[in-house]
Amino acid sequence: MSVSRITREDAIEQSVTNYLRNALFVERTYPADQIEMVEAFDEERFQGPLSKNYLAVGFNFDDGGRPLELGSDLVERVYTIEIWCVGRDGTAGRNLANAVRDAAEEDGLIPLIDLRDPAQPVIDHLYVNPVTVSRQPVPDPKPWQRFLWIVHIPVVDQYYLSNP
């Protein structure tokens, strides 16, 4: 099945991913040979000892949205993007998780890009709610679970349903 329409949710996830990739690897100069950012979590890729640290988009949730104006289709929806920080050791995992949090909260805004245009112009902004970081201790962990942190990035999107 091919999908010809890009949903607003796809644009939000990709915008957050692109923003974090730039913030970490360009602005904060984290070494790309030691950290790999993957756009989906796939346990198959994490078998055996880790050769590097990973940032993976985990799961995304929305709050169902709510109308903002009477007589209008303006809505507000909060999307929570999870970033799984899989560290080779505790220091690397914690550092990456906190760097992701700091990058997401830095300006309080993340540019929303138009994925339909190859130039990916900014078409709106997402407001960042407070970001949370949590260590995920796992009993009898697999190698990738030993130093796992999860960063929850809630972003607020306000848009007209008739013009997604």
Image: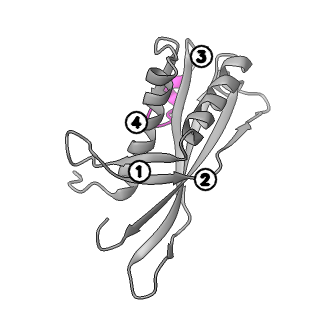
> In the rendered image of this protein, does residue 103 appear above or below residue 121?
above
Q: Nearer the viewer, mark 1 or mark 3?
A: 1
Q: Nearer the viewer, mark 2 or mark 3?
A: 2
Which residue type does callout 4 highlight? Asn
* Number of residues whose C-alpha sits closer than 10 Å to that of mark 2, classed few (under 14), some (14–19) or many (20 or more): some
Instruction: Report the Cα–Cα distance between label 2 and label 4.
Output: 18 Å
Secondary structure under the numbered disc 3 in the rendered image: loop
Span highlighted in magenta in the image: 38-46
User: Relative to 155, is 18 on the left or the right?
Assistant: left
Which residue type does callout 1 highlight? Ile
N-terminal label among 2 and 4: 4
N-terminal label among 2 and 3: 3
N-terminal label among 2 and 1: 1
User: Relative to 164, is 44 on the left or the right?
Assistant: right
Closer to the camera in the image, 157 or 45 = 157
Secondary structure under the numbered disc 2 in the rendered image: loop
Q: Which residue is mark 1?
A: 12
Instruction: Report the Cα–Cα distance between label 1 and label 4.
Output: 10 Å
Q: How many marks?
A: 4
Q: Which residue is mark 4?
A: 18
Residue 112: percent from left, percent from top:
38, 49
Residue 96: percent from left, percent from top:
62, 25
Residue 12 visible in the current orientation: yes
Asked if the magenta segment contains residue 40, the reply would be yes
Q: Which mark is residue 134?
A: none
> Residue visible at 48% across and 29% down?
23
Q: Tell me if label 3 and label 4 are in contact, CB under 8 Å.
A: no
* Number of residues whose C-alpha sits closer than 10 Å to that of mark 1, classed few (under 14), some (14–19) or many (20 or more): many
Q: Which residue is mark 2?
A: 129
Q: Which residue is mark 3?
A: 48
